[in-house]
């Protein structure tokens, strides 16, 4: 698996997680966060390997579609780049707000 793609999908999952079903969340976490193989996920979820592959592919496309419409990830990246010039305490506070979504 491409490390950059994995990082991106994990970040998109952080942002758009609540828009996914619990099954989508669980499979994506197994695959992208826990680095389980398709077979391991299929065994854990008691479904076929093909079903896991299809769901991961469809959910990845869904996450990318959310980002193409909402641009939250892109905005977050721009903000993170701009706050690098702030003093450390202000930067940490803004980073925490972005992390928590509050």
Image (spheres, rainbow, N blue to C red):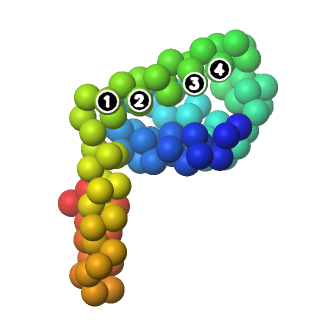
Q: Height in image: 60 above or below 72? A: above
Q: Which residue is mark 3?
A: 56
Do callouts 3 and 4 mark residues in contact (Cβ within 8 Å)?
yes
Q: Position of residue 11 (x, y in %)?
A: 45, 48
Q: Which residue is mark 4?
A: 52
Q: Which residue is mark 2?
A: 64
Label 2 – label 1 distance at C-alpha = 6 Å
Q: Which residue is mark 1?
A: 68
Question: Which of pointers 4 and 2 lies earlier in the amino acid sequence?
Answer: 4
Depth order, front residue of 63/29: 63
Asked whether, in this view, residue 91 is left or right of residue 10, the answer is left
Do callouts 3 and 1 mark residues in contact (Cβ within 8 Å)?
no
Asked whether, in this view, residue 69 is left or right of residue 45, the answer is left
Depth order, front residue of 10/100: 10
Residue 55 image-quadrant placement: top right
Question: Which of pointers 3 and 1 lies earlier in the amino acid sequence?
Answer: 3
Write the residue at 56% across / 21% down. Answer: 57
Question: Which of pointers 3 and 2 lies earlier in the amino acid sequence?
Answer: 3
Instruction: Say if residue 67 shows up in the picture.
Output: yes
Point out the frontmost of discs 3 and 2. Answer: 2
Quarter in which the C terminus is drawn: bottom left
Point out the frontmost of discs 1 and 4. Answer: 1
Q: Residues within 10 Å of mark 1 (few under 14, many from 20)?
A: few
Write the residue at 76% across / 33% down. Answer: 37
**In what element is the residue under mark 3?**
helix
Instruction: Say if residue 100 shows up in the picture.
Output: no
Residue 38 image-quadrant placement: top right
């Amino acid at each position: 698996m491409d490390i950059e793609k994995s990082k991106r999908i994990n970040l998109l999952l952080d942002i758009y997680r609540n828009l996914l079903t619990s099954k989508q969340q669980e499979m994506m976490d197994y695959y992208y966060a826990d680095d389980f193989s398709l077979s391991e996920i299929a065994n854990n979820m008691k479904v076929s390997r093909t079903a896991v592959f299809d769901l991961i592919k469809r959910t990845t496309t869904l996450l990318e579609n959310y980002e193409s419409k909402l641009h939250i990830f892109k905005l977050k990246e721009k903000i993170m780049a701009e706050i690098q010039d702030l003093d450390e305490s202000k930067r940490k506070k803004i980073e925490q707000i972005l992390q928590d979504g509050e």
